[in-house]
Protein backbone atom coordinates (compact mmCIF):
# COMPACT_ATOMS: atom_id res chain seq x y z
CA UNK A 1 0.00 0.00 0.00
CA UNK A 2 1.28 3.45 -0.97
CA UNK A 3 0.05 6.60 0.75
CA UNK A 4 0.88 10.07 -0.55
CA UNK A 5 0.35 13.02 1.80
CA UNK A 6 0.20 16.58 0.48
CA UNK A 7 1.44 18.90 3.22
CA UNK A 8 3.22 18.43 6.53
CA UNK A 9 2.86 20.23 9.88
CA UNK A 10 -0.06 19.21 12.14
CA UNK A 11 -2.25 17.35 9.66
CA UNK A 12 0.16 15.69 7.25
CA UNK A 13 3.01 14.83 9.60
CA UNK A 14 0.65 13.44 12.24
CA UNK A 15 -1.08 11.26 9.66
CA UNK A 16 2.25 9.85 8.54
CA UNK A 17 3.52 9.19 12.07
CA UNK A 18 0.30 7.48 13.20
CA UNK A 19 0.07 5.41 10.02
CA UNK A 20 3.63 4.20 10.43
CA UNK A 21 2.88 3.09 14.00
CA UNK A 22 -0.06 1.10 12.65
CA UNK A 23 1.60 -0.31 9.54
CA UNK A 24 5.33 -0.96 9.39
CA UNK A 25 5.22 -1.90 5.71
CA UNK A 26 3.18 0.88 4.08
CA UNK A 27 5.02 3.15 1.64
CA UNK A 28 4.45 6.69 2.87
CA UNK A 29 5.45 9.85 0.97
CA UNK A 30 5.06 13.42 2.26
CA UNK A 31 5.12 16.25 -0.27
CA UNK A 32 5.87 19.60 1.38
CA UNK A 33 6.38 22.70 -0.76
CA UNK A 34 8.18 24.52 2.06
CA UNK A 35 11.46 23.77 3.79
CA UNK A 36 9.92 22.64 7.06
CA UNK A 37 8.05 19.39 7.51
CA UNK A 38 6.89 19.69 11.12
CA UNK A 39 7.04 22.91 13.09
CA UNK A 40 5.24 24.66 15.96
CA UNK A 41 3.02 27.04 14.00
CA UNK A 42 1.35 28.25 17.21
CA UNK A 43 4.71 29.27 18.64
CA UNK A 44 5.60 31.72 15.86
CA UNK A 45 4.37 34.92 17.59
CA UNK A 46 6.39 34.03 20.69
CA UNK A 47 9.52 33.70 18.60
CA UNK A 48 8.85 37.21 17.31
CA UNK A 49 8.57 38.45 20.89
CA UNK A 50 11.60 36.57 22.16
CA UNK A 51 9.85 34.24 24.63
CA UNK A 52 11.06 31.44 22.34
CA UNK A 53 14.67 32.37 21.69
CA UNK A 54 15.98 29.80 19.21
CA UNK A 55 14.41 29.21 15.83
CA UNK A 56 15.42 25.56 16.08
CA UNK A 57 13.01 25.14 19.00
CA UNK A 58 10.13 25.69 16.58
CA UNK A 59 11.19 22.90 14.24
CA UNK A 60 9.78 19.73 15.77
CA UNK A 61 11.17 17.40 13.12
CA UNK A 62 13.46 17.88 10.14
CA UNK A 63 12.94 15.79 7.00
CA UNK A 64 15.98 13.75 7.99
CA UNK A 65 14.90 13.14 11.59
CA UNK A 66 11.35 12.31 10.51
CA UNK A 67 12.67 9.77 8.02
CA UNK A 68 15.00 8.27 10.60
CA UNK A 69 12.24 7.79 13.15
CA UNK A 70 9.30 6.83 10.93
CA UNK A 71 10.86 5.56 7.69
CA UNK A 72 8.79 8.07 5.71
CA UNK A 73 9.91 9.47 2.36
CA UNK A 74 9.84 13.19 3.14
CA UNK A 75 10.28 15.54 0.18
CA UNK A 76 10.72 19.18 1.07
CA UNK A 77 10.31 21.84 -1.63
CA UNK A 78 8.13 19.42 -3.54
CA UNK A 79 4.86 21.05 -4.58
CA UNK A 80 1.84 19.00 -5.58
CA UNK A 81 0.44 20.82 -8.62
CA UNK A 82 -2.19 18.41 -9.95
CA UNK A 83 -4.28 15.47 -8.75
CA UNK A 84 -5.74 12.92 -11.16
CA UNK A 85 -8.31 11.03 -9.08
CA UNK A 86 -9.15 8.62 -11.89
CA UNK A 87 -5.53 7.57 -12.51
CA UNK A 88 -4.70 7.97 -8.79
CA UNK A 89 -1.63 10.11 -9.44
CA UNK A 90 -0.22 13.38 -8.17
CA UNK A 91 1.93 15.63 -10.35
CA UNK A 92 4.83 16.93 -8.27
CA UNK A 93 7.05 19.92 -9.06
CA UNK A 94 10.56 20.13 -7.65
CA UNK A 95 10.79 23.79 -6.66
CA UNK A 96 14.59 23.82 -6.94
CA UNK A 97 14.97 22.20 -10.37
CA UNK A 98 11.53 22.93 -11.84
CA UNK A 99 11.22 19.27 -12.88
CA UNK A 100 7.76 17.68 -12.76
CA UNK A 101 7.12 14.01 -12.03
CA UNK A 102 4.11 11.82 -11.33
CA UNK A 103 3.56 10.01 -8.05
CA UNK A 104 1.06 7.15 -7.94
CA UNK A 105 -0.98 6.44 -4.80
CA UNK A 106 -3.40 3.95 -3.32
CA UNK A 107 -4.57 6.48 -0.74
CA UNK A 108 -4.08 10.24 -0.87
CA UNK A 109 -4.24 12.62 2.10
CA UNK A 110 -4.68 16.33 1.39
CA UNK A 111 -3.36 18.50 4.24
CA UNK A 112 -2.30 21.75 2.55
CA UNK A 113 -3.35 24.12 5.33
CA UNK A 114 -4.23 27.71 4.57
CA UNK A 115 -2.61 30.97 3.52
CA UNK A 116 -2.89 34.48 4.89
CA UNK A 117 -5.82 36.32 3.35
CA UNK A 118 -4.21 39.50 2.05
CA UNK A 119 -6.19 41.99 -0.08
CA UNK A 120 -4.83 42.55 -3.58
CA UNK A 121 -4.07 46.23 -2.96
CA UNK A 122 -1.50 45.39 -0.26
CA UNK A 123 2.04 45.57 -1.74
CA UNK A 124 3.78 42.23 -1.21
CA UNK A 125 7.21 43.53 -2.22
CA UNK A 126 7.60 46.02 0.64
CA UNK A 127 9.99 44.84 3.36
CA UNK A 128 7.88 46.64 5.98
CA UNK A 129 4.78 44.53 5.30
CA UNK A 130 4.51 41.04 6.79
CA UNK A 131 2.30 38.01 7.24
CA UNK A 132 2.87 35.28 9.83
CA UNK A 133 2.18 31.70 8.75
CA UNK A 134 5.62 30.06 8.57
CA UNK A 135 9.01 30.02 10.27
CA UNK A 136 10.57 32.26 7.56
CA UNK A 137 7.76 34.77 8.17
CA UNK A 138 8.57 34.83 11.90
CA UNK A 139 12.28 35.19 11.24
CA UNK A 140 11.67 38.16 8.92
CA UNK A 141 9.53 40.01 11.48
CA UNK A 142 11.92 39.33 14.35
CA UNK A 143 14.99 40.42 12.40
CA UNK A 144 13.24 43.57 11.19
CA UNK A 145 12.20 44.53 14.72
CA UNK A 146 15.65 43.86 16.19
CA UNK A 147 17.60 45.54 13.40
CA UNK A 148 15.34 48.47 12.40
CA UNK A 149 13.86 49.11 15.86
CA UNK A 150 10.47 50.36 14.62
CA UNK A 151 8.58 52.63 17.00
CA UNK A 152 5.09 51.89 15.66
CA UNK A 153 3.23 48.97 14.12
CA UNK A 154 -0.23 48.35 12.74
CA UNK A 155 -1.65 44.83 12.95
CA UNK A 156 -4.65 44.17 10.71
CA UNK A 157 -6.87 41.44 12.10
CA UNK A 158 -8.25 40.73 15.56
CA UNK A 159 -8.01 36.93 15.54
CA UNK A 160 -5.52 34.69 17.34
CA UNK A 161 -2.48 35.58 15.24
CA UNK A 162 -3.26 39.30 15.21
CA UNK A 163 -3.59 39.49 18.98
CA UNK A 164 -0.55 37.34 19.69
CA UNK A 165 1.63 39.32 17.28
CA UNK A 166 0.37 42.58 18.78
CA UNK A 167 1.22 41.45 22.32
CA UNK A 168 4.68 40.27 21.34
CA UNK A 169 5.47 43.49 19.48
CA UNK A 170 4.39 45.47 22.55
CA UNK A 171 6.73 43.27 24.61
CA UNK A 172 9.47 44.43 22.22
CA UNK A 173 8.64 48.07 23.01
CA UNK A 174 6.66 48.81 19.84
CA UNK A 175 3.57 51.04 19.95
CA UNK A 176 0.89 48.86 18.35
CA UNK A 177 -2.51 49.69 16.85
CA UNK A 178 -4.78 46.78 15.94
CA UNK A 179 -7.32 47.30 13.17
CA UNK A 180 -10.24 44.89 12.86
CA UNK A 181 -13.29 44.80 10.63
CA UNK A 182 -15.47 43.10 13.28
CA UNK A 183 -17.02 45.12 16.13
CA UNK A 184 -14.67 43.43 18.61
CA UNK A 185 -11.61 41.20 18.64
CA UNK A 186 -12.03 37.44 18.31
CA UNK A 187 -15.34 36.86 16.52
CA UNK A 188 -15.51 33.46 18.26
CA UNK A 189 -16.43 35.11 21.57
CA UNK A 190 -19.59 36.98 22.44
CA UNK A 191 -19.78 40.77 22.65
CA UNK A 192 -20.46 40.76 26.40
CA UNK A 193 -17.25 38.80 26.95
CA UNK A 194 -15.34 41.14 24.65
CA UNK A 195 -16.27 44.04 26.95
CA UNK A 196 -13.81 42.82 29.57
CA UNK A 197 -11.25 41.68 27.00
CA UNK A 198 -11.09 45.09 25.30
CA UNK A 199 -10.63 46.84 28.64
CA UNK A 200 -7.71 44.54 29.47
CA UNK A 201 -6.03 44.96 26.08
CA UNK A 202 -6.21 48.74 26.32
CA UNK A 203 -4.83 48.68 29.86
CA UNK A 204 -1.81 46.86 28.47
CA UNK A 205 -1.13 49.44 25.80
CA UNK A 206 -2.84 47.99 22.73
CA UNK A 207 -4.72 50.60 20.71
CA UNK A 208 -7.90 49.12 19.26
CA UNK A 209 -9.75 50.25 16.16
CA UNK A 210 -12.56 47.74 15.67
CA UNK A 211 -15.42 47.97 13.22
CA UNK A 212 -12.92 49.51 10.81
CA UNK A 213 -12.17 48.29 7.29
CA UNK A 214 -8.89 48.53 5.41
CA UNK A 215 -9.08 50.44 2.13
CA UNK A 216 -5.50 50.92 0.94
CA UNK A 217 -1.79 51.19 1.66
CA UNK A 218 0.30 54.24 0.77
CA UNK A 219 4.08 53.95 0.83
CA UNK A 220 6.23 56.83 2.03
CA UNK A 221 10.00 56.91 2.19
CA UNK A 222 10.08 56.50 5.96
CA UNK A 223 6.57 55.33 6.82
CA UNK A 224 3.63 53.33 5.60
CA UNK A 225 0.19 54.89 5.63
CA UNK A 226 -2.61 52.43 6.32
CA UNK A 227 -5.83 53.83 4.90
CA UNK A 228 -8.97 52.77 6.79
CA UNK A 229 -12.63 53.72 6.99
CA UNK A 230 -11.69 55.64 10.17
CA UNK A 231 -8.79 57.57 8.64
CA UNK A 232 -5.10 57.09 7.89
CA UNK A 233 -2.61 55.47 10.27
CA UNK A 234 1.11 56.17 9.92
CA UNK A 235 3.30 53.22 10.86
CA UNK A 236 6.82 51.81 10.64
CA UNK A 237 5.66 48.25 9.95
CA UNK A 238 2.46 46.43 9.04
CA UNK A 239 1.43 42.87 9.88
CA UNK A 240 -1.47 41.44 7.87
CA UNK A 241 -3.34 38.92 10.04
CA UNK A 242 -6.80 39.42 8.59
CA UNK A 243 -7.85 35.80 8.31
CA UNK A 244 -6.95 32.83 6.12
CA UNK A 245 -8.05 31.15 2.94
CA UNK A 246 -7.75 27.38 2.41
CA UNK A 247 -5.05 26.21 -0.03
CA UNK A 248 -7.46 23.95 -1.87
CA UNK A 249 -7.25 24.99 -5.51
CA UNK A 250 -5.53 21.71 -6.37
CA UNK A 251 -8.45 19.77 -4.86
CA UNK A 252 -11.07 21.90 -6.57
CA UNK A 253 -9.31 21.53 -9.93
CA UNK A 254 -9.37 17.76 -9.47
CA UNK A 255 -13.16 17.81 -9.07
CA UNK A 256 -13.10 17.13 -5.33
CA UNK A 257 -16.17 18.68 -3.71
CA UNK A 258 -15.61 21.93 -1.79
CA UNK A 259 -18.00 24.38 -0.16
CA UNK A 260 -18.62 27.96 -1.32
CA UNK A 261 -15.59 29.24 0.64
CA UNK A 262 -13.28 26.64 -0.90
CA UNK A 263 -13.05 24.27 2.09
CA UNK A 264 -12.94 20.57 1.22
CA UNK A 265 -16.07 18.63 2.15
CA UNK A 266 -15.44 15.46 4.15
CA UNK A 267 -17.54 12.83 5.92
CA UNK A 268 -17.12 11.51 9.47
CA UNK A 269 -14.18 9.37 8.30
CA UNK A 270 -12.50 12.45 6.74
CA UNK A 271 -13.11 11.03 3.25
CA UNK A 272 -13.57 13.45 0.37
CA UNK A 273 -15.87 12.96 -2.61
CA UNK A 274 -13.04 11.17 -4.48
CA UNK A 275 -12.33 7.50 -3.86
CA UNK A 276 -9.26 6.88 -1.73
CA UNK A 277 -8.76 10.60 -1.01
CA UNK A 278 -8.88 12.04 2.51
CA UNK A 279 -8.42 15.60 3.79
CA UNK A 280 -7.58 17.10 7.18
CA UNK A 281 -6.75 20.34 8.95
CA UNK A 282 -7.35 24.00 8.15
CA UNK A 283 -8.49 23.21 4.60
CA UNK A 284 -11.57 21.11 5.46
CA UNK A 285 -15.16 21.78 6.46
CA UNK A 286 -16.25 19.65 9.42
CA UNK A 287 -19.35 19.42 11.59
CA UNK A 288 -19.89 21.55 14.68
CA UNK A 289 -20.26 19.08 17.54
CA UNK A 290 -23.58 20.16 19.11
CA UNK A 291 -25.54 21.38 16.08
CA UNK A 292 -24.08 19.25 13.30
CA UNK A 293 -23.81 22.32 11.08
CA UNK A 294 -20.81 22.90 8.82
CA UNK A 295 -17.81 24.61 10.43
CA UNK A 296 -14.35 25.83 9.47
CA UNK A 297 -11.99 25.16 12.38
CA UNK A 298 -8.38 26.23 11.95
CA UNK A 299 -7.01 24.80 15.20
CA UNK A 300 -4.12 22.42 15.82
CA UNK A 301 -6.01 20.10 18.18
CA UNK A 302 -8.78 19.18 15.73
CA UNK A 303 -6.22 18.83 12.91
CA UNK A 304 -4.25 16.29 14.95
CA UNK A 305 -7.36 14.28 15.83
CA UNK A 306 -8.49 14.29 12.21
CA UNK A 307 -5.05 13.05 11.13
CA UNK A 308 -5.23 10.18 13.60
CA UNK A 309 -8.64 9.17 12.23
CA UNK A 310 -7.39 9.20 8.63
CA UNK A 311 -4.43 7.00 9.56
CA UNK A 312 -6.77 4.64 11.38
CA UNK A 313 -9.10 4.43 8.40
CA UNK A 314 -6.29 3.71 5.96
CA UNK A 315 -5.06 0.99 8.34
CA UNK A 316 -8.54 -0.53 8.57
CA UNK A 317 -9.63 0.86 11.96
CA UNK A 318 -13.18 2.35 11.78
CA UNK A 319 -12.48 5.58 13.68
CA UNK A 320 -14.92 8.48 13.40
CA UNK A 321 -14.56 12.25 13.77
CA UNK A 322 -17.52 13.44 15.82
CA UNK A 323 -17.13 17.13 15.07
CA UNK A 324 -15.45 20.10 16.68
CA UNK A 325 -16.65 22.17 19.61
CA UNK A 326 -14.06 24.82 18.72
CA UNK A 327 -12.28 24.87 22.07
CA UNK A 328 -9.54 27.48 22.16
CA UNK A 329 -7.28 29.33 24.55
CA UNK A 330 -5.15 32.43 24.11
CA UNK A 331 -2.73 34.33 26.32
CA UNK A 332 -3.53 38.05 26.48
CA UNK A 333 -0.67 39.65 28.41
CA UNK A 334 -1.05 38.44 32.02
CA UNK A 335 -4.52 36.96 31.52
CA UNK A 336 -6.03 34.02 29.69
CA UNK A 337 -9.09 33.83 27.48
CA UNK A 338 -10.53 30.39 26.83
CA UNK A 339 -13.78 29.15 25.31
CA UNK A 340 -15.46 25.93 24.32
CA UNK A 341 -18.71 25.04 22.58
CA UNK A 342 -21.12 27.51 21.06
CA UNK A 343 -21.24 31.26 21.37
CA UNK A 344 -24.60 32.75 22.30
CA UNK A 345 -25.07 34.20 18.83
CA UNK A 346 -24.35 30.87 17.16
CA UNK A 347 -26.55 28.89 19.56
CA UNK A 348 -29.51 31.17 18.84
CA UNK A 349 -28.88 30.88 15.09
CA UNK A 350 -29.06 27.10 15.42
CA UNK A 351 -32.45 27.20 17.11
CA UNK A 352 -31.38 26.50 20.69
CA UNK A 353 -33.40 28.13 23.52
CA UNK A 354 -30.18 29.64 24.80
CA UNK A 355 -29.82 31.28 28.21
CA UNK A 356 -26.69 32.63 29.86
CA UNK A 357 -25.28 33.42 33.25
CA UNK A 358 -22.30 35.68 34.05
CA UNK A 359 -20.20 35.01 37.14
CA UNK A 360 -17.01 36.38 38.68
CA UNK A 361 -15.41 33.75 40.88
CA UNK A 362 -12.08 33.28 42.63
CA UNK A 363 -9.44 31.06 41.06
CA UNK A 364 -8.89 29.50 44.49
CA UNK A 365 -9.98 29.93 48.11
CA UNK A 366 -10.19 33.61 48.97
CA UNK A 367 -8.39 33.20 52.28
CA UNK A 368 -5.35 31.70 50.55
CA UNK A 369 -3.05 34.42 49.14
CA UNK A 370 -2.99 35.19 45.43
CA UNK A 371 -6.54 34.40 44.36
CA UNK A 372 -7.60 36.00 41.08
CA UNK A 373 -11.04 36.62 39.64
CA UNK A 374 -12.21 34.50 36.69
CA UNK A 375 -15.03 35.91 34.58
CA UNK A 376 -17.29 33.09 33.40
CA UNK A 377 -20.09 33.10 30.86
CA UNK A 378 -22.00 29.81 30.84
CA UNK A 379 -24.46 29.04 28.04
CA UNK A 380 -27.17 26.40 28.38
CA UNK A 381 -30.49 25.39 26.87
CA UNK A 382 -33.46 26.61 28.94
CA UNK A 383 -35.65 23.61 28.10
CA UNK A 384 -33.20 20.72 28.43
CA UNK A 385 -30.62 22.34 30.70
CA UNK A 386 -27.91 21.02 28.39
CA UNK A 387 -24.59 22.87 28.48
CA UNK A 388 -24.00 24.65 25.16
CA UNK A 389 -20.80 26.57 25.74
CA UNK A 390 -18.64 28.61 28.03
CA UNK A 391 -16.23 31.54 27.85
CA UNK A 392 -13.64 32.23 30.56
CA UNK A 393 -11.38 35.21 31.17
CA UNK A 394 -8.93 35.51 34.03
CA UNK A 395 -5.47 34.63 35.28
CA UNK A 396 -4.38 31.35 36.85
CA UNK A 397 -6.91 28.53 36.76
CA UNK A 398 -8.81 29.85 33.76
CA UNK A 399 -7.51 27.10 31.50
CA UNK A 400 -8.53 24.19 33.71
CA UNK A 401 -12.10 25.49 34.14
CA UNK A 402 -12.49 25.75 30.36
CA UNK A 403 -11.11 22.23 29.94
CA UNK A 404 -13.55 20.83 32.51
CA UNK A 405 -16.44 22.42 30.64
CA UNK A 406 -15.10 21.15 27.31
CA UNK A 407 -15.22 17.60 28.70
CA UNK A 408 -18.72 18.21 30.09
CA UNK A 409 -19.99 19.36 26.67
CA UNK A 410 -18.42 16.35 24.97
CA UNK A 411 -20.20 14.12 27.54
CA UNK A 412 -23.56 15.80 26.86
CA UNK A 413 -23.97 17.02 30.43
CA UNK A 414 -26.62 19.39 31.70
CA UNK A 415 -25.90 22.50 33.75
CA UNK A 416 -27.35 20.78 36.82
CA UNK A 417 -24.88 17.94 36.40
CA UNK A 418 -22.02 20.43 36.65
CA UNK A 419 -23.04 20.84 40.29
CA UNK A 420 -22.21 17.18 40.92
CA UNK A 421 -18.73 17.17 39.40
CA UNK A 422 -16.27 16.11 42.08
CA UNK A 423 -13.29 18.27 41.20
CA UNK A 424 -9.95 18.47 42.95
CA UNK A 425 -9.81 20.90 45.86
CA UNK A 426 -7.16 22.38 48.11
CA UNK A 427 -6.97 26.08 49.06
CA UNK A 428 -4.06 26.91 46.68
CA UNK A 429 -5.95 25.46 43.70
CA UNK A 430 -9.69 25.95 44.09
CA UNK A 431 -12.57 26.36 46.52
CA UNK A 432 -14.72 23.62 48.01
CA UNK A 433 -17.28 24.66 45.41
CA UNK A 434 -15.22 25.01 42.25
CA UNK A 435 -16.16 27.83 39.84
CA UNK A 436 -17.50 25.20 37.42
CA UNK A 437 -19.75 23.82 40.19
CA UNK A 438 -20.97 27.32 41.05
CA UNK A 439 -21.69 28.10 37.40
CA UNK A 440 -23.77 24.93 37.24
CA UNK A 441 -25.63 25.91 40.40
CA UNK A 442 -26.43 29.35 39.00
CA UNK A 443 -27.72 27.81 35.76
CA UNK A 444 -29.73 25.20 37.67
CA UNK A 445 -31.45 27.96 39.66
CA UNK A 446 -32.57 29.53 36.38
CA UNK A 447 -33.67 26.26 34.75
CA UNK A 448 -35.70 25.27 37.82
CA UNK A 449 -37.27 28.72 38.15
CA UNK A 450 -35.73 29.56 41.54
CA UNK A 451 -34.51 32.83 40.08
CA UNK A 452 -35.24 34.78 36.92
CA UNK A 453 -32.30 36.31 35.08
CA UNK A 454 -32.10 39.59 33.19
CA UNK A 455 -29.29 41.04 31.08
CA UNK A 456 -27.80 44.51 30.75
CA UNK A 457 -28.29 44.73 26.99
CA UNK A 458 -32.06 44.61 27.61
CA UNK A 459 -32.11 47.35 30.28
CA UNK A 460 -33.37 50.00 27.84
CA UNK A 461 -36.51 47.91 27.25
CA UNK A 462 -37.74 48.50 30.82
CA UNK A 463 -40.18 51.27 31.74
CA UNK A 464 -38.71 52.86 34.90
CA UNK A 465 -42.22 53.90 35.98
CA UNK A 466 -43.49 50.33 35.87
CA UNK A 467 -40.61 48.54 37.62
CA UNK A 468 -38.34 48.97 40.62
CA UNK A 469 -34.62 49.19 39.83
CA UNK A 470 -32.62 48.11 42.86
CA UNK A 471 -28.89 48.23 43.70
CA UNK A 472 -28.04 46.10 46.77
CA UNK A 473 -24.37 47.06 47.08
CA UNK A 474 -23.09 48.85 50.15
CA UNK A 475 -23.50 52.66 50.30
CA UNK A 476 -19.78 53.27 49.70
CA UNK A 477 -19.89 51.19 46.53
CA UNK A 478 -22.98 53.05 45.37
CA UNK A 479 -21.35 56.45 45.94
CA UNK A 480 -18.29 55.46 43.90
CA UNK A 481 -20.47 54.77 40.88
CA UNK A 482 -24.05 53.80 40.18
CA UNK A 483 -26.66 53.71 37.44
CA UNK A 484 -29.27 56.44 37.23
CA UNK A 485 -32.69 55.19 38.28
CA UNK A 486 -31.46 52.46 40.62
CA UNK A 487 -32.23 52.97 44.28
CA UNK A 488 -29.76 51.68 46.88
CA UNK A 489 -30.85 49.31 49.63
CA UNK A 490 -27.77 47.36 50.77
CA UNK A 491 -28.19 43.64 51.26
CA UNK A 492 -26.89 43.95 54.83
CA UNK A 493 -30.00 46.00 55.69
CA UNK A 494 -32.38 44.47 53.17
CA UNK A 495 -35.12 42.83 55.20
CA UNK A 496 -35.60 45.94 57.33
CA UNK A 497 -36.47 48.02 54.23
CA UNK A 498 -38.74 45.66 52.27
CA UNK A 499 -41.78 47.76 53.14
CA UNK A 500 -40.28 50.59 51.05
CA UNK A 501 -40.78 48.58 47.86
CA UNK A 502 -43.99 48.46 45.86
CA UNK A 503 -45.10 44.79 45.78
CA UNK A 504 -47.11 45.47 42.60
CA UNK A 505 -43.98 46.29 40.60
CA UNK A 506 -41.43 43.77 39.28
CA UNK A 507 -38.01 44.33 40.87
CA UNK A 508 -34.77 44.23 38.85
CA UNK A 509 -31.79 43.76 41.16
CA UNK A 510 -28.05 44.10 40.73
CA UNK A 511 -24.98 44.08 42.97
CA UNK A 512 -21.32 44.10 41.98
CA UNK A 513 -21.09 40.61 40.46
CA UNK A 514 -24.48 38.92 40.83
CA UNK A 515 -24.13 36.98 44.10
CA UNK A 516 -25.66 39.47 46.56
CA UNK A 517 -28.42 40.30 44.09
CA UNK A 518 -29.24 36.58 43.87
CA UNK A 519 -29.63 36.46 47.65
CA UNK A 520 -31.81 39.58 47.48
CA UNK A 521 -33.96 37.90 44.83
CA UNK A 522 -34.47 34.88 47.05
CA UNK A 523 -35.56 37.18 49.90
CA UNK A 524 -37.92 39.08 47.61
CA UNK A 525 -39.38 35.86 46.22
CA UNK A 526 -39.98 34.64 49.73
CA UNK A 527 -42.01 37.80 50.38
CA UNK A 528 -44.11 37.51 47.23
CA UNK A 529 -42.27 39.92 44.92
CA UNK A 530 -41.72 39.28 41.20
CA UNK A 531 -37.97 39.83 40.84
CA UNK A 532 -35.15 39.47 38.32
CA UNK A 533 -31.42 39.11 38.97
CA UNK A 534 -29.29 41.17 36.57
CA UNK A 535 -26.52 38.80 35.48
CA UNK A 536 -22.94 39.98 35.87
CA UNK A 537 -23.84 42.91 38.10
CA UNK A 538 -22.32 46.37 38.07
CA UNK A 539 -18.93 44.93 37.11
CA UNK A 540 -20.24 43.77 33.73
CA UNK A 541 -22.21 47.00 33.26
CA UNK A 542 -19.06 49.09 33.80
CA UNK A 543 -17.18 47.04 31.18
CA UNK A 544 -20.12 47.44 28.76
CA UNK A 545 -20.20 51.21 29.30
CA UNK A 546 -16.46 51.53 28.72
CA UNK A 547 -16.64 49.37 25.58
CA UNK A 548 -19.40 51.51 24.09
CA UNK A 549 -17.77 54.83 24.97
Image: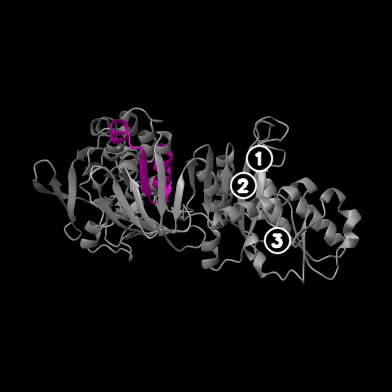
Q: Is residue 147 magenta?
A: yes
Q: Is residue 409 above or below residue 433?
A: below
The residue that appears at 85% across and 48% down in the rendered structure is 492
Q: Earlier in the sequence, mark 3 or mark 2?
A: 2
Q: Is residue 12 magenta?
A: no
Residue 132 appears in view = no
Q: Which residue is mark 1?
A: 423
Nearer mark to the viewer, of 1 and 2? 2
Q: Quadrant of residue 42?
A: top left
In the image, taking residue 342 as reference, residue 440 lies left or right, namely right
User: Real-space Cα distance between discs 3 and 2?
Assistant: 17 Å
Q: Earlier in the sequence, mark 1 or mark 2?
A: 2
Q: Earlier in the sequence, mark 3 or mark 1?
A: 1
Q: Which residue is mark 2?
A: 375
Identify which residue, 517 or 63, lies in the foreground: 517
Give the structural element (helix, strand or loop) at label 3: strand
How far from the left and from the top, in percent, is residue 437? 68, 46
User: Real-space Cα distance between discs 3 and 1?
Assistant: 27 Å
Q: Are marks 1 and 2 in contact (CB under 8 Å)?
A: no
Q: Are marks 3 and 2 in contact (CB under 8 Å)?
A: no
User: Real-space Cα distance between discs 1 and 2?
Assistant: 19 Å
In the picture as drawn, the residue positioned furthest to the front comes out as: 221
Q: Which residues make up the magenta segment?
A: 144-168
Q: Quadrant of residue 137?
A: top left
Q: Quadrant of residue 270?
A: bottom left
Q: Residues within 10 Å of mark 1 (few under 14, many from 20)?
A: few
Give the structural element (helix, strand or loop) at label 2: strand
How far from the left and from the top, in percent, is residue 263? 33, 59
Q: Which residue is mark 3?
A: 453
The residue that appears at 23% across and 64% down in the rendered structure is 255
How far from the left and from the top, in percent, is residue 16? 30, 41
Amino acid sequence: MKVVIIGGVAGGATTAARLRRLDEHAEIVILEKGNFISYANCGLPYFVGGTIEDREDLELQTPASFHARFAVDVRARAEAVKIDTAAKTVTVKNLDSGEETEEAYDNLVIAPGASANVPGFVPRDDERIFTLRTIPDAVRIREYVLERKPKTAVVVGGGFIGLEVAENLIDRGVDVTLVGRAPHVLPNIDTDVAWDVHRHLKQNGLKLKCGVSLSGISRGEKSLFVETSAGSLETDLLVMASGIRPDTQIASDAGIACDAQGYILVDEAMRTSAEGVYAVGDAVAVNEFLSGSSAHVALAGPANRQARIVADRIAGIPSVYHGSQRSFIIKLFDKTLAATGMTEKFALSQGFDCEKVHLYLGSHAGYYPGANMIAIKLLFDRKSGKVLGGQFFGAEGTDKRADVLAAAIRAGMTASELCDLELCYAPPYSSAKDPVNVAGMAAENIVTGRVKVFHWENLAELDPAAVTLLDVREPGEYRRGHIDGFINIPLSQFRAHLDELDPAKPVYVHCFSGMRSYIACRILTGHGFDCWNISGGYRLYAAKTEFEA
